[in-house]
Structure formats: structure tokens, C-alpha cells
Image: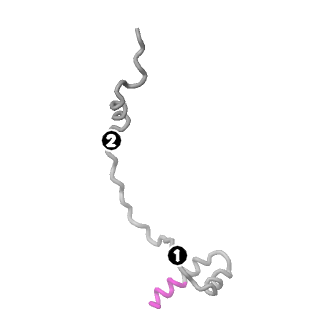
Amino acid sequence: MTNPPRRPVNPMDAAEALFKPVKKKLEQAVERPALPNTKELVSLKIDSDVLAFFQENGPGWQDRINDVLRAAMKNRL
């Protein structure tokens, strides 16, 4: 009695078996609403003296800039 070959006899059948389509459908991604007051990463060119002013008090300088911009926004510049 001979042992059956380890590889499929037909290479096309082997290729089809490897690349057969997925039968399970993926679920639709659920869109979630954006969280309020989320921060967005931006690139902004600021004069060096303005940047130095906000950075001189140490960490939190980005929050201080944000607070000043928010106050200007509320006052409509």
C-alpha cells in the first residue's frame, strides 16, 4: 500500500484552496459621534517671542495658548 502524496496533485487546486474567498461577512463598522471638546493636532507657526512668553512658565504652555485663543474666540477678536 502506498502513502498518498502530501501535496495536492494539481497545483491549481492547491492555489485555489489557499485563496478561496472568505465566507463570513464582516460586520459594518459602527460610527461613533465625536466626543465634545476633543483636541486636534495642528501645526501652527508662531513668532518666537510669543512662544517664549507662553513657555516661560513651564509645562502647560499649550493649554495657556488654547485658553487665550478661546477667550479671543468668545470676544470675537
Q: Nearer the viewer, residue 56 or 37?
A: 56
Q: Main secondary structure of the magenta part?
A: helix
| SS at mark 2 in the image | loop
Q: Would you place residue 29 above or below residue 53 in this image?
A: above
Residue type pointed to by label 1: Ser
> Horizontal and vertical percent for residue 17?
35, 33
Density class for disc 1 (Cα within 10 Å; few <14, some 14-19, many ≥20) is few
Q: Nearer the viewer, residue 40 or 6?
A: 6
Decide which of tag 2 and tag 1 comes sooner along the chain. Answer: 2
Kindly indicate the quadrant of the structure image that contains residue 3. top left
Q: Residue furthest top?
A: 1
Q: Measuring 40% from the left and 8% from the top, which residue is drawn there?
A: 1
Structural distance between the alpha carbons of marks 2 and 1: 43 Å
> Horizontal and vertical percent for residue 30?
36, 56
User: Residue beneath label 1, please?
Assistant: 43
Residue 24, labelled with which disc? 2
Left or right, 59 with reference to 29: right
Q: Nearer the viewer, residue 8 or 75?
A: 8
Residue type pointed to by label 2: Lys
